[in-house]
Image (spheres, helix red, strand yellow):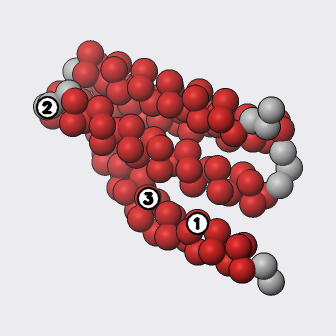
Amino acid sequence: MNPASDSSGSAILNALGSGLPMLLLQFLLEREMLRNGNPAAATVLGGALVALAIPLAALLATTGALLDILVWGVVAVLLQLLTVLIVSHLLRGMRAMIEDGQVAAAIPLVAAQLSIGLLNAAAMVPA
């Protein structure tokens, strides 16, 4: 077995171990807000799903390699988590506004997520 593939496999598992629980928690929190009819939470969740689908769709269109899709899928998730952290830091109080159902607070986050998703997709597609 190739030692480089061992280290990349380990990196994937480490990234999944740290990023996936945060993503699942986010989805659970959004789900609860959706049940309560929160339009801002619905906007953020919809934006996150589209932002994750964009790079994965680009990969599916350009490669059939499962490892590529898995690695870049993990990268896409981590970049989306980083985007949420950065936007939350820049827009203090955004989380509370989204929890209160203020769609205006969700729009900059969704725009940032979609932008990162598009840039991520462009970086993944082979030249």
Q: Which of the two discs, 1 and 3, sits closer to the camera?
A: 1
Q: Sort mark 1 into few (<14), some (14-19) or many (20+) by Cα contacts within 10 Å.
A: some
Q: What residue would you read off at disc 1?
A: 12
Q: Amino acid at mark 2?
A: Gly
The answer to whether residue 16 is above or below residue 49 is: below
First in sequence: mark 3 or mark 2? 3
Quadrant position of the N terminus in the picture: bottom right
Give how far across and how far down residue 27 sits, in percent: 40, 48
Q: Which of the two discs, 1 and 2, sits closer to the camera?
A: 1
**Residue in the image at 63% along x and 74% along y:** 7
Q: Which element type, helix, strand or loop, lies under badge 3?
A: helix
Q: Which element type, helix, strand or loop, lies under badge 1?
A: helix
Give how far across and how far down residue 79 sits, in percent: 47, 44
Q: Sort mark 2 into few (<14), some (14-19) or many (20+) by Cα contacts within 10 Å.
A: few
First in sequence: mark 1 or mark 2? 1
Q: Which element type, helix, strand or loop, lies under badge 2?
A: loop
- Alpha carbon of mark 1 to alpha carbon of mark 3: how far? 10 Å
Q: Is residue 50 left or right of residue 2?
A: left
Circles 1 and 2: CB atoms closer than 8 Å: no
Q: Amino acid at mark 1?
A: Ile
Q: Amino acid at mark 3?
A: Gly
Which mark, residue 19? 3
Which mark, residue 93? 2
**Residue in the image at 83% along x and 38% along y:** 62
Q: Sort mark 3 into few (<14), some (14-19) or many (20+) by Cα contacts within 10 Å.
A: some
**Residue in the image at 50% along x and 24% along y:** 115
The reply to whether residue 31 is in sight is no
